[in-house]
Image (cartoon, coloured by chain):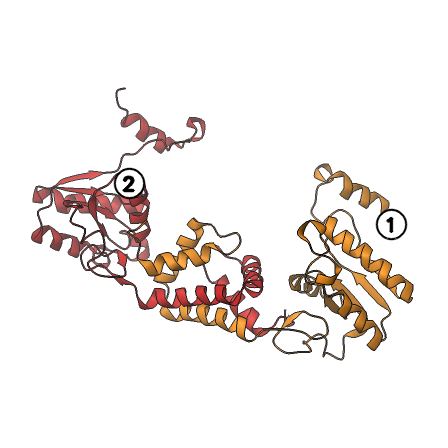
Chain colours: A orange, B red
């Protein structure tokens, strides 16, 4: 498409590099930006630039934040005795959205995956153990993803943490709300059966 | 989600304003950018900024371009005697992709739509008539969208152009390739019937 102006192809190319955005969507977005007021395009560009400049990892929980320690770690009302261990910063956002958790977090930045060459040393596990020495921690909730890598990470952490006399829990497995029994896979259904509770 | 750092929410907000990108997708893209190398984020931001700075409308065909007259209009190998009239710059890209058209274009920047208050004066119709006076035009291909507004615009243009002794054509209507007769709507099927050709 040599007929397309270079500044346009450049934005299309850059947008296409984002996950889930193909060349067609990138083109549609680019032409939308072309029609949008200049302020909107500038606001987007500046927000992206600032994203990289002003964002750091919290020195305590390794969540992505604009100041360290982050808002959650420095909030006196959050129970520092509870640490919820997650794989990614987005998981923190998901759990916060429930409004049900008043403890703190620890972001591993990944999960153990021998295939991808990610071992415990690549994750923020040493830093988690460090937190246990400096603070009184009662419970660690393992909220890694319910998949192979997440489960392997949870198992590894359990073996590390249980000897220290800390309660280690993990999120419940079962049927998702709005799901359909008929279409549930066997493992989910087995989990749901095994975890059944009296009503 | 007050726990999310401000630079992050800013990018999420700006990305959410793009068409087809909801808050969830915006969030996923933002966290992708956070992990991506700083150069990638900067390249995206700069491309967006340059988009607005370096892009103009071609003085002849009103396509979006980085120089005027645009690459197609200034290309001596394109037949200036053929003008393909389209609604949007993206339509030019679509037709160029076929590789079947060697003429020039004229971008109307919209279609006649009384409901949205868009009349002929809001479109580049006067400019199209201007081109007919300065150049020898044999055929005008109306390639407006096959919907109410596009058809109204095509009809309006036909009435203006036919008295000038110019051949006015429009794109064929019929079944799309890969389509299924069973699921074709009545109007498409009627068009396909009416436009049937001998094999």
Residue A5: image quadrant is bottom left
Residue assigned mark 2: B99
Q: Where is residue A91 shown, x and y percent of the image?
A: 68, 61
Quadrant containing the N terminus of chain B in the rendered view: bottom right
Within 10 angstroms of label 1, few (less than 14), some, or many (20 or more) residues? Answer: few
Task: Specify few, some or many for label 2: CA neighbours under 10 Å numbering under 14, 14-19, or 20 or more.
Answer: few
Along the horizontal axis of the image, is B42 left or right of B108? right
The answer to whether the residues at label 2 and label 1 have Cβ atoms under 8 Å apart is no
Q: Quadrant of residue B25?
A: bottom right
Q: Position of residue B111 (x, y in %)?
A: 28, 51
- Residue in view at x 49 percent, y 68 percent: A48
Q: Does residue B23 appear anywhere in the picture?
A: yes
Residue located at (27% from left, 59% from top)? B65
Q: Residue at x 80, y 74 (%)?
A: A80
Quarter of the picture holding the C terminus of chain B: top left
Going by the image, does A156 lie left or right of B116? right
Residue A147 visible in image: no
Residue at 74%, 67% (x, y): give it. A106
**Looking at the image, how many numbered discs can be counted on the residues?**
2
Q: Compare residues B185 and A85 and report the one nearer the observer.
A: A85
In depth, the one of A132 and A170 nearer the eye is: A132
Quarter where residue B3 is shown: bottom right
Question: Residue B43 location in percent, x, y?
Answer: 44, 65
Q: Any mark on residue A197, and which? A: 1
Mark 2 belongs to chain: B
Q: Nearer the viewer, residue A61 or A94?
A: A61
Residues marked 2 and 1, same chain: no
Q: Secondary structure at mark 1?
A: loop
Residue A180 vs B178, above or below: the answer is: below
């Amino acid at each position: 498409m040599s007929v397309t102006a270079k500044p346009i192809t450049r934005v299309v190319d850059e947008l296409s590099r984002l996950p889930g955005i193909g060349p067609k969507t990138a083109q549609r977005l680019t032409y939308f930006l072309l029609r949008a007021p200049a302020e909107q395009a500038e606001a987007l560009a500046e927000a992206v630039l600032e994203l990289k400049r002003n964002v750091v990892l919290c020195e305590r929980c390794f969540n992505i934040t604009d100041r360290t320690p982050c808002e959650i770690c420095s909030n006196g009302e959050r129970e520092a005795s509870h640490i919820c261990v997650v794989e990614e910063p987005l998981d923190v956002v998901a759990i916060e959205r429930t409004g049900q958790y008043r403890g703190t977090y620890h972001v591993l930045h990944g999960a153990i995956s021998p295939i991808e060459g990610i071992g415990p040393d690549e994750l923020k596990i040493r830093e988690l153990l460090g937190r246990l020495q400096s603070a009184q921690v009662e419970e660690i909730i393992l909220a890694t993803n319910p998949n192979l890598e997440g489960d392997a990470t949870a198992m590894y952490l359990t073996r590390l943490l249980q000897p220290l006399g800390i309660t280690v829990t993990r999120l419940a497995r079962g049927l998702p709300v709005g799901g359909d029994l008929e279409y549930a896979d066997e493992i989910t259904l087995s989990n749901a059966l095994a975890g059944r509770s009296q009503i």
